[in-house]
Amino acid sequence: MLDVIVIGAGQAGLAAAWHLQRKGLIAGQQFIVLDANPGPGGAWRHRWPSLTLGTAHGIHDLPGFPQEPADPTEPASSVVSRYYGAYEDQFALSVHRPWEVTAVTDPHDGPHLNVTSRHRETGEQRTDQTRTIINATGTWDQPYWPYYPGGASFKGRQLHTREYTDASDFSGQRVVVVGGGASAVQFLLPLAQAGAHTMWSTRRAPVFGERDFDREWGRDVERAVRTRTEAGLPTLPVVATTGLPLTPAYQQGIDEGILVSKGPLARLTDKGVVFAGVTPQYAGELMPAWEGGAVDVDVVLWATGFRPAIRHLAPLGLRTEHGGIRTDGAIVFDDARVFLAGYGAGASTIGATRTGRHAAVAAWRYVSEQRVGVRAG
């Protein structure tokens, strides 16, 4: 039986594996990492090519192995995949891929968990027994598509952040980008530069700030989000707490009217979208008051974010009546064998490394206590 299975080899999962190793657990013998991707990089390996290292909001060092300087014009997906691959090799972290965890179950015949996974290429299935798990699956595999009336009738193209590749694909087209987060603004500027006719739809007025996304920012995010996760409430996007960074490029986009929202959508039609309008009480500099109305568009790009990819934990019954999982940091209140890294505040690029460490230390303590109990028995 394994002591720990880490599910996911993104930033949080690799950080957790490193700290488990530092605590004395042996990779491949006492713990393993299961990852569904065909190669290193976590969610970063799926980012669109036009998101370069220089335009990404933050790629943070993993513990014990700083990044080498890289070309800021290189796609972030390539930089991070290379860095994470080197990290796995440097510390021999025993990453097994492409194994997609399909269920974590409690067999009720001992204080362990069964982790069932499927090989994405061969279809082979396996079940591993472990004393604990550290779930670090992030959000990339759980895109959020909001419902709007008329969505099925729209005859143009609809796509989510996951499917976006390059702004040049939309040259000359009328594109409405829906969403108030970082992905939306990272789409709008390149789309406009590529000759697309863009519109931005947000439910609330966009909020830009001049604060750096540094470690103190990460701590503030964690404090703000922690009250929700402790209550078992669903997690919110990080931008709901932090706002967006006001970079020179974004300020230029605001000045040019590209990063100015037309407000929320009311519905879709076969030819486009209908904006709900913005009343003066909700209006602001970046979302002027107006009556809304129908607009013909060719493309609706849903930059509406993601939800935690935790369906495989459903057999454990951890969700509250509110839909979230009650946690204290990385510790799950309702099952002492389960630890979450990259959940809630840990879903940010700064928080992921920190929660990876917290999860690893907590799992190691639990395993150590179990061993003492077995010897005492």
Image (cartoon, grey):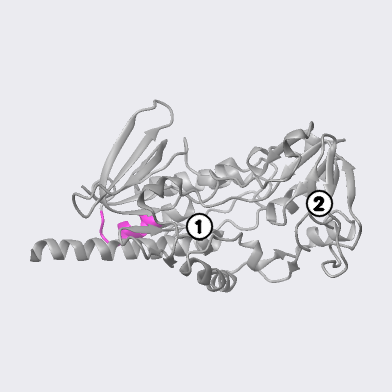
In which quadrant of the rendered image does the C terminus lie?
bottom left
Which range of residues does the magenta coloring cover? Answer: 16-25
Q: Is residue 221 left or right of residue 135?
A: right
Residue 224 in the image: above or below residue 122: below
Q: Nearer the viewer, residue 338 or 94?
A: 338
Residue 314 in the image: above or below residue 122: below
Q: Is residue 118 left or right of residue 38?
A: left
- Specify the amino acid type for callout 1: Gly
Residue 98 in the image: above or below residue 327: above
Q: Residue at x 69, y 47 (%)?
A: 73
Using the rendered view, name the quadrant where residue 376 is placed: bottom left
Can you tell which of label 2 and label 1 is closer to the viewer?
1
Q: Nearer the viewer, residue 144 or 342?
A: 144
Q: Residue at x 89, y 56 (%)?
A: 257
Residue 113 at x, y percent in the picture = 27, 49
Q: Residue at x 19, y 62 (%)?
A: 370
Indicate the secondary structure of the residue bearing disc 1.
loop
Mark 1 surroundings: few (<14), some (14-19) or many (≥20) residues within 10 A: few
Q: Is residue 369 left or right of residue 352?
A: left
- Is residue 19 within the magenta segment? yes
Of mark 2 and mark 1, the one earlier in the sequence is: 2
- How far, Cα to Cα, is label 2 from label 1? 29 Å
Residue located beneath label 2 in the image = 200
Q: Residue at x 69, y 48 (%)?
A: 303
Residue located beneath label 1 in the image = 323
Residue 107 makes an appearance in the image: yes
Mark 2 surroundings: few (<14), some (14-19) or many (≥20) residues within 10 A: many
- Is residue 61 within the magenta segment? no
Using the rendered view, name the quadrant where residue 296 is placed: top right
